[in-house]
Image (cartoon, rainbow, N blue to C red):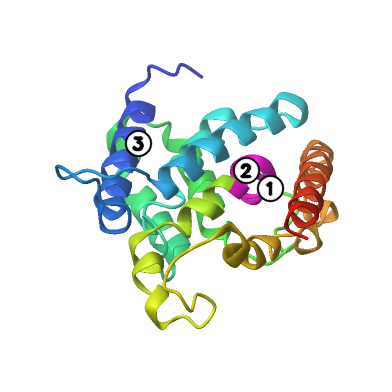
């Protein structure tokens, strides 16, 4: 795939604009109409990285997968997005061809974005692009990058602004000891490597679960 192709550049540009507009509400910078963090854009970038890592071993249609990556969360720019998979699929059907994306691959992209919210192991074997997107989307939540994104979500304005009503923070401020229980809820018990469709996805998941387990064990030990 030529990364200078018009559709790829345009999909990335649109995702950056959409997610930035939403991020300003949650992570407003002290000056200017910008944000100091953009959770959704960081997530999408990681999904692309993981999709490419999986495809390097498992193969797949690179154009279809990468297009699906940059479309799948355009209707969930930060934390909200009811039926965002269905909406993204409808958008792809109406817009991808005009961007110069290969017409015969559009149905594959639409299926993938519509299925990325399916339950574990609920995508049929013939839907390879959908399985690749599902694996990459969920794998992005594992390991150090997933943890940093999780932590930064809890530094958003709505969370910080709600401390006064949260009995977990009686002094209306955060300390490491206060927030640790929230972080420790992300223990690897929440994650399983056998949830994934591809061998390479499962390998990467096991690796990241090991890193998470070591991190949380060390955190709990320091806070003892």
The nearer-to-camera label among 1 and 2 is: 1
Identify the residue at horizontal 37%, vertical 44% (top origin).
37
Residue 11, disc? 3
Q: In 3D space, how far apart are the residues under numbered discs 2 and 3 (Cα atoms)? A: 18 Å
Comes first in the chain, label 1 or label 2: 2
- Closest to the observer, 65 or 200: 200
- Closest to the observer, 172 or 71: 172
Q: Which residue is identified by label 1?
A: 142
Decide: marks 2, 3 in contact (CB < 8 A)? no
The nearer-to-camera label among 1 and 3 is: 1
Q: In 3D space, how far apart are the residues under numbered discs 1 and 2 (Cα atoms)? A: 21 Å
Give the extent of the magenta segment: 127-147
Dot 1 falls on a residue whose secondary structure is: loop
Q: Position of residue 189 (x, y in %)?
A: 81, 62
Dot 3 falls on a residue whose secondary structure is: helix
Q: Position of residue 69 (x, y in %)?
A: 50, 42
Q: Is residue 115 visible?
A: yes
Q: Is residue 111 visible?
A: no
Comes first in the chain, label 1 or label 3: 3
Query: Which quadrant holds the C terminus?
Result: bottom right
């Amino acid at each position: 795939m030529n990364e200078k192709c018009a559709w790829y550049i345009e999909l990335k540009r649109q995702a950056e604009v959409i997610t930035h507009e939403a991020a300003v509400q949650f992570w407003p910078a002290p000056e200017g109409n910008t944000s100091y963090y953009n959770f959704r854009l960081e997530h999408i970038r990681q999904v692309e990285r993981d999709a490419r890592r999986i495809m390097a071993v498992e193969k797949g249609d690179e154009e279809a997968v990468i297009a699906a990556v940059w479309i799948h969360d355009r209707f969930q720019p930060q934390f909200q997005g009811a039926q965002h998979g269905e909406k993204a699929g409808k958008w792809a059907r109406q817009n991808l061809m005009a961007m110069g994306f290969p017409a015969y691959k559009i149905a594959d992209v639409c299926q993938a974005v519509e299925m990325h919210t399916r339950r574990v192991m609920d995508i049929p074997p013939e839907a390879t692009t959908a399985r690749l997107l599902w694996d990459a989307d969920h794998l992005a939540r594992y390991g150090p990058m997933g943890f940093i994104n999780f932590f930064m979500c809890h530094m958003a304005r709505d969370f910080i602004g709600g401390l006064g009503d949260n009995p977990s923070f009686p002094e209306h401020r955060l300390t490491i000891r206060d927030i640790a229980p929230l972080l420790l809820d992300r223990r690897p018990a929440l994650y399983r490597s056998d949830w994934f469709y591809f061998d390479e996805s499962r390998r990467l998941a096991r690796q990241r679960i090991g890193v998470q387990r070591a991190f949380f064990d060390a955190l709990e030990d320091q806070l003892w």
